Amino acid sequence: MPDLIKVAKFGGTSLADANAMNRCASIIEFDSDKRIIVLSATSGTTNLLASLATIDDLSARLSVFEQIKENHHNILSDLNLPDEYQKMLDELLSGLKAKIESAEPHDIREMDTLLSYGERLSSTLFTGLLNSKGIEAAYVDARKIIKTNSQYGDAEPLVDQIRDRAEKFLLPEIKSKRLVTQGFIGSDKAEITTTLGRGGSDYTAALLAEALDADVLEIWTDVNAIYTTDPRICSDAVPITEMTFDEAAELSFFGAKVLHPATLKPAIRKNIKVYVGSSIYPDQPGTWIVKNTLDKPIIRAISLRPEQTLITVHSLDMLHRHGFLAKLFQILAEYKISVDLVTTSEVSVSLTIDTNQTGLLQRLSPEMIKELESIAEVQVEKDLALIALVGNNLDSTAGVSGPLFNMLDNINIRMICHGASSHNLCFLVDQQKAASVVQKLHKYFIPQKVEN
């Protein structure tokens, strides 16, 4: 039995081609504690599979299949795997082709099955690669372990069932071999394939780490750490060597792309340390996410989340009366609209919708707006961006709000949320001006050229 149990997840860009897969295999080879390996689909595969939902013409759909087939055959050839893995790969590809030919492209349940092939293909190749290097590894179908409800496209995991199955099927095996499995996919009680939503591979790894009482959860990606802001926006961004669960959770929720927002929930429940590192440059220091840190700056990082929609409802019926908010949120719930931020006055309510999420923009339908207009005046503003300052004690620290809004005196701020959380202060601005706002705030609040 290894001294520690580590769950290591590798993202799509880390598996883009044979060279990338070999780098990941080397990361595993030199650390015998990495027992559970969770894989995304190879880079671009999920997007190709998802495009099938918008293609009705069968010949065009089969053209997508041929592209996926060629990509994986190229990796197989470059890895020079034994014939048995070509047979396994071709069996999967035959199943995918048959599904494409028979599936209804707009059926979300059918799409979950189609999407699952991406991870199943990559994990088949990677299992073969590890074994060819003399690292004893076994392929595990994640759908036998990750049990969910039947909310296809964005399923909720059933934590107790996952723990039971992980203890039964995984725990005895990790003593003698590495187990390679898929992120993102699961199955419901009828054994129908489900998915955890885009980016759900991180979440899968965290759920397995929780179920196995793992010591460490590792997220290997194409960036070497979590940064104080997006380096593509701000050249002064610096890597964060250590941060708390609370800070990382806020940062992922408010737009940081490195972690799936749900990833930290299982880690927090079991106090499992999380490491974020680069599969391209594994020797460079990454970011450790832990329960507590010695250093707790007021502002740890600044995030930006584009494509936000602000809905403001105004009604005199709110004045000194009960029940209005219940009606408002009942309508939103009926249309499965998830609300992020809410501010209220005596006669108005403003709320934000993350229309960057798949499908949410479509749910803001004329029918839904018409229902809202039956109870209030409605204003809808699009093309906004949410900027969040993430740190510590922001609800009780003087000297933050004043400089912040003085610097932005020429920017039209559409909504402010401050005080609801000690770990964030956030507001909405015009999307076109958001990058320059982040640059200005980062220069003022984040110490330059000093790692946190």
Image (cartoon, grey):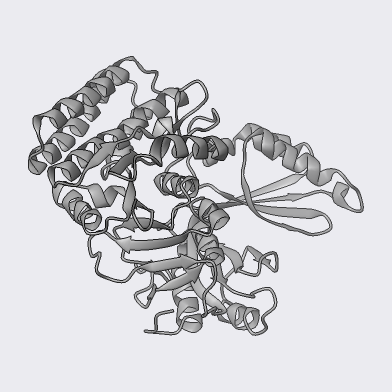
Q: Quarter of the image containing the C terminus?
A: bottom left
* 162 relative to 170 in the view: left or right: right
**Picture quadrant of residue 406:** bottom right
Figure disc tally: 0
In this orientation, does residue 112 appear?
Answer: yes
Residue drawn where x is 27% and y is 55% of the image: 32
* 137 relative to 36 in the view: left or right: left
**Picture quadrant of residue 423:** bottom right
Q: Position of residue 340 (x, y in %)?
A: 62, 52
Residue drawn where x is 46% and y is 77% of the image: 442
Q: Nearer the viewer, residue 227 or 90?
A: 90
Q: Is residue 373 above or below residue 113?
A: below
* 324 relative to 196 in the view: left or right: right
Q: Is residue 113 above or below residue 212?
A: above
Residue drawn where x is 74% and y is 53% of the image: 349
Q: Position of residue 84 (x, y in %)?
A: 13, 28
Residue drawn where x is 13% and y is 37% of the image: 76
Direction front: furthest residue: 1
Q: Nearer the viewer, residue 399 or 348?
A: 399
Q: Position of residue 330 (x, y in %)?
A: 74, 37
Direction top: furthest residue: 102
Q: Position of residue 53 (x, y in %)?
A: 38, 28
Direction right: furthest residue: 320
In this orientation, does residue 57 appear?
Answer: no
